[in-house]
Amino acid sequence: MNKITAAITCLHGYVPPDILTNADLEKMVDTSDEWIMTRTGIKERRIQKEPGKATSDMAVEAVNGLLKKRGISAEEIDLIIFATITGDMIFPSSACVLADKIGAKNAWGYDLSAACSGFLFALETGATFIQSGKYKKVVVIGGDKMSSIIDYTDRNTCIIFGDGLGCVLLEPNEEGYGVRDSILKIDGSGRHYLYQKAGGSLKPPTHETIDAREHYVFQDGKTVFKFAVTNMAEVSANIMERNNLTSEDVTWLVPHQANLRIIDATAERMGLGRDKVMINIDHFGNTTNGTLPLLLWEWESKLKKGDNLILSAFGGGFTWGAMYIKWAYDASASAY
Ligand code: UT7
């Protein structure tokens, strides 16, 4: 019997309808469209404004869309891995909340926390469950309601982030399609450069932490930029080398959308032109766990069976990594 690999067989996404433009931000903080565009490449982002809606509600939309496309019921899902840093609550997990909302009665699951690398880490985990032979249908979700932890008086961070979420279905494959290789890393010495200072067990919420605005994202952008630009490029080049892939062999780079300059540096290191790079930072901003699945969702109709994709990410922690995927289906010709 051939070795089992984990193939993405279907995917879907969701972004909320409300748009926050650079022009809107100019009215909220001391910034300009020109500064935001040249430093980040972001023009607008989506914000989940509807009262009472949380990250799991975006997942309901995305996963129900996926199930419909694939023609399966929620009861067929074995496992849900939900990569997010903005779960509905500290506990229980958003995987539990989602399973209840969509009726995934036979699934187990959990949330995974790795900031902007979360979807990559969750894909690796989900793929390993498929490769074990025990699980046949694993839903991997990545997404965040970043607007719930962003300080809209802080121009260093509020211009960057947006809300959105995507999901993929992993199923066993015996022809070698799907996840082929990955290099994943963490370095916790970077934890003070990108984090939420209060709200955890180290600093539970108090009036003081709220007054000090410590329940929002803090980022030392310059330092994070330096680490991100070096490590994302290096790990992406390494995974190509390790799999004997030349720049001609790579069909698409699927990079985390934190900053257009980081994306360009990564592509350059891999010897790829912009025509082989998926980019949606201009209209979605940085959706943290959502960037990679949202890219795949937007590009799905262009993907062909056998395409070589390199997924690559860097995020708070620090966390980073790259994954090589051989695409398993031709969306335009498939039944999905
Ligand atoms: O997704 C997880 C990983 N995250 C990342 O990879 C993000 C990495 N970092 C970045 O993308 C960039 O560092 C930022 C986009 C966050 C910032 O760009 P930068 O070129 O590193 O700017 P900076 O922080 O060095 O700030 C340059 C100047 C400063 O003014 P002075 O000190 O030179 O007078 C800032 O105060 O720009 C100022 N500035 C702004 N000006 C207008 C900072 N934010 C803004 C703003 N509008 N929104």
Image (tube, helix red, strand yellow):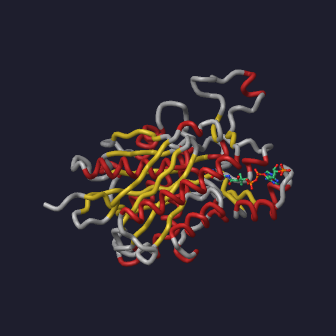
Residue 244 visible to the viewer: yes
The picture places residue 23, in percent across and down from the top left corner, at 81, 61
Residue found at x 45% / y 55%: 167
Say which of 294 and 19 sits in front: 294
Say which of 146 and 326 sits in front: 326
User: Image check: 218 left or right of 67?
Assistant: right
Residue found at x 55% / y 77%: 275
The picture places residue 132, in percent across and down from the top left corner, at 24, 48
Q: Quadrant of residue 69?
A: bottom left
Say which of 98 and 298 sits in front: 298
Q: Quadrant of residue 332?
A: bottom left
Q: Quadrant of residue 257?
A: bottom right
Above or below residue 114? Residue 73 is below
* Position of the C terminus by quadrant: bottom left
Above or below residue 200? Residue 283 is below
The picture places residue 324, in percent across and down from the top left corner, at 39, 62
Say which of 137 and 228 sits in front: 228
Residue found at x 72% / y 47%: 157
The picture places residue 61, in percent across and down from the top left corner, at 50, 54
User: Image check: 271 left or right of 286?
Assistant: left
